[in-house]
Image (spheres, grey):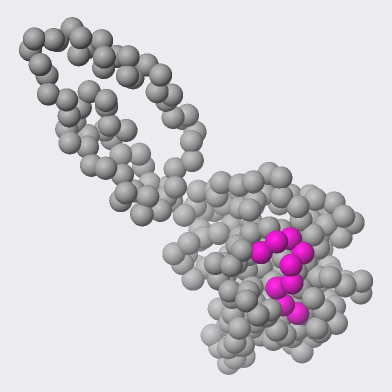
């Protein structure tokens, strides 16, 4: 922030008056809280005016591993709008949940947010590479709570559901299907993760914490939040640059 006294030319005849005016101008300016969110966007950084003299130290840049600022008043709903849905609390290889339902049942946004990634073409090939295209047709949503919600193996994606589009809780994103490595079984693969930018992070997007406890709550009309668990995982692991040994699942 530019000091109110910078840029004023001192007038030798009135030094005392200038000093009093400068102090008065600064007294009612509130200081920024120490824990204020700083947007890591380079556009914001570039828009800040250059300091003409005695520049202040630049705050450290926020890395992609920093938790996303969140809303705490969000509503969450079950991701498949159907009565005949079954799922297991565990999943092979990594945390995630497969929700088994008839092909064509509506897949909906769990909460208010912005669509992050959309795959409208099934590029999975069992000959490889395994991993990046396992999900077939898929959608990921960055909820207003800062959590990324991912659903894959869809049979169709709703028209107008594109990256950057804002959606509401319960809005249809697509339909249950069996694309990707679904093994010809109709189901929705569902994952919870943080948003990790700047990487092809399919191994994070597919899920890093177990969804079942939250699904149990949402199915009953509850609103259990995965924010604390996802944030804790991100603080511990950051944004890993490789999937490790596991490439299974969608």
Q: Report if residue 169 lies within the magenta region.
A: yes
Q: Quadrant of the C terminus?
A: bottom right
**Quarter of the image holding residue 136?**
bottom right
Residue drawn at the location 84% of the way across and 70% of the way down: 81
**Quarter of the image holding residue 80?**
bottom right
Q: Position of residue 167 (x, y in %)?
A: 66, 64
Q: Position of residue 23 (x, y in %)?
A: 29, 14
Q: Position of residue 74 (x, y in %)?
A: 71, 50
Q: Report if residue 182 lies within the magenta region.
A: no
In the image, residue 192 sits, relative to residue 136, either above or below, namely above
* Lateral position of residue 21 relative to residue 30, left or right: left
Residue drawn at the location 61% of the way across and 72% of the way down: 246
Can residue 74 be seen here? The reply is yes
In the depicted view, which residue is nearer to us: 31 or 127? 31
* Lateral position of residue 16 relative to residue 63, left or right: left
In the depicted view, which residue is nearer to us: 122 or 114? 114
Q: Residue furthest top?
A: 16
Q: Position of residue 3 (x, y in %)?
A: 27, 27
Residue drawn at the location 63% of the way across and 74% of the way down: 161
Can residue 207 be seen here? The reply is no
Q: Residue furthest left?
A: 12
* Lateral position of residue 193 relative to residue 105, left or right: left
In the image, residue 236 sits, relative to residue 14, either above or below, namely below
In the image, residue 156 sits, relative to residue 201, either above or below, namely below
Question: What segment carries the magenta color?
Answer: 167-175
Q: Quadrant of the N terminus?
A: top left
């Amino acid at each position: 922030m530019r000091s109110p006294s910078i840029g004023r030319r001192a007038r030798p005849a009135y030094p005392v008056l200038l000093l009093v005016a400068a102090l008065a101008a600064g007294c009612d300016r509130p200081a920024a809280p120490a824990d204020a969110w700083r947007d890591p966007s380079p556009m914001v950084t570039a828009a800040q005016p250059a300091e003409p003299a005695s520049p202040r130290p630049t705050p450290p840049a926020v890395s992609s591993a920093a938790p996303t600022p969140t809303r705490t008043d969000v509503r969450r709903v079950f991701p498949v709008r159907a009565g005949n849905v079954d799922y297991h609390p565990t999943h092979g290889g990594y945390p995630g949940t497969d929700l088994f339902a008839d092909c064509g049942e509506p897949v909906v946004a769990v909460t208010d947010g912005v669509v992050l990634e959309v795959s409208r073409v099934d590029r999975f090939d069992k000959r490889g590479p395994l991993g990046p295209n396992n999900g077939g047709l898929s959608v990921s949503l960055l909820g207003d709570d800062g959590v990324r919600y991912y659903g894959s193996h869809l049979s169709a994606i709703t028209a107008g559901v594109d990256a950057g589009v804002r959606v509401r809780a319960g809005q249809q994103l697509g339909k249950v299907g069996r694309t990707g490595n679904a093994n010809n079984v109709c189901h929705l693969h569902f994952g919870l993760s943080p948003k990790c930018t700047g990487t092809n992070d399919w191994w994070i997007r597919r899920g890093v914490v177990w969804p079942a406890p939250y699904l149990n709550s949402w199915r009953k009309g509850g609103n259990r939040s995965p924010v604390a668990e996802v944030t804790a995982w991100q603080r511990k692991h950051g944004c890993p640059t490789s999937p490790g040994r596991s490439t299974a699942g969608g």
